[in-house]
Amino acid sequence: MDDPRYHTAQWKKLRAIVLRESPLCHYCKQAGRVTVATTVDHATPIARGGEFFDRANLRSACENCNYSKRDQTEDEFLVKGCDVNGIPLSPNHPWRQAAHG
Ligand SMILES: [Zn+2]
């Protein structure tokens, strides 16, 4: 998160738009959970060639998902470690530890 672009007015504006359009965590939603998003994640990480300021590359995310996903692409994150219902297999996964409700 130390990319200087995170401190630009352009990013802050874009981030606010994404959170307003999609107030719930995109990744939790895929797993059937309803979690308020507090961060905006790059679906394809910048380190993997994703566009920084591309709205189409941005996903609302909760801190747990954003932290867990890190440098994985959206597809890798959603497929890896999840059963057919999208529930993470690992008992230590943040999705299982986080208090929901
Ligand atoms: Zn989430």
Image (cartoon, helix red, strand yellow):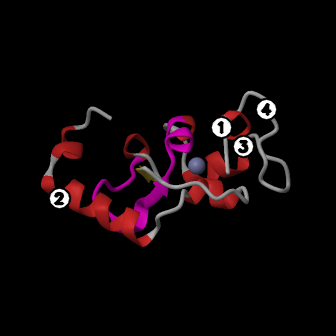
Sequence-wise first label, 1 or 3: 3
Segment colored magenta: 49-67
Observer-side mark, 4 or 1, equals 1
Kindly identify the residue that appears in the image at 76 percent across and 40 percent down. Answer: 81
Residue 26 forms part of the magenta stretch: no
- In the picture, residue 97 is in which quadrant? top right
Residue 31: percent from the left, percent from the top?
Answer: 72, 55
SS for tag 1?
Answer: loop
Residue 43 visible to the viewer: no
Residue corresponding to mark 3:
80
Q: CA distance from mark 1 to mark 3?
A: 19 Å
Residue corresponding to mark 4:
90
Q: Nearer the viewer, residue 6 or 17?
A: 17
SS for tag 4?
Answer: loop
Marking on residue 10? 2
Sequence-wise first label, 4 or 3: 3
Which amino acid, by three-letter code, is at mark 1?
Answer: Ala
Instruction: Locate the N terminus by quadrant.
Output: top left
Q: Nearer the viewer, residue 7 or 101?
A: 101
Residue 23: percent from the left, percent from the top?
Answer: 47, 64
Kindly identify the residue that appears in the image at 74 percent across and 27 percent down. Answer: 92
Sequence-wise first label, 4 or 1: 4
Which amino acid, by three-letter code, is at mark 4?
Answer: Ser
Q: CA distance from mark 2 to mark 3?
A: 32 Å
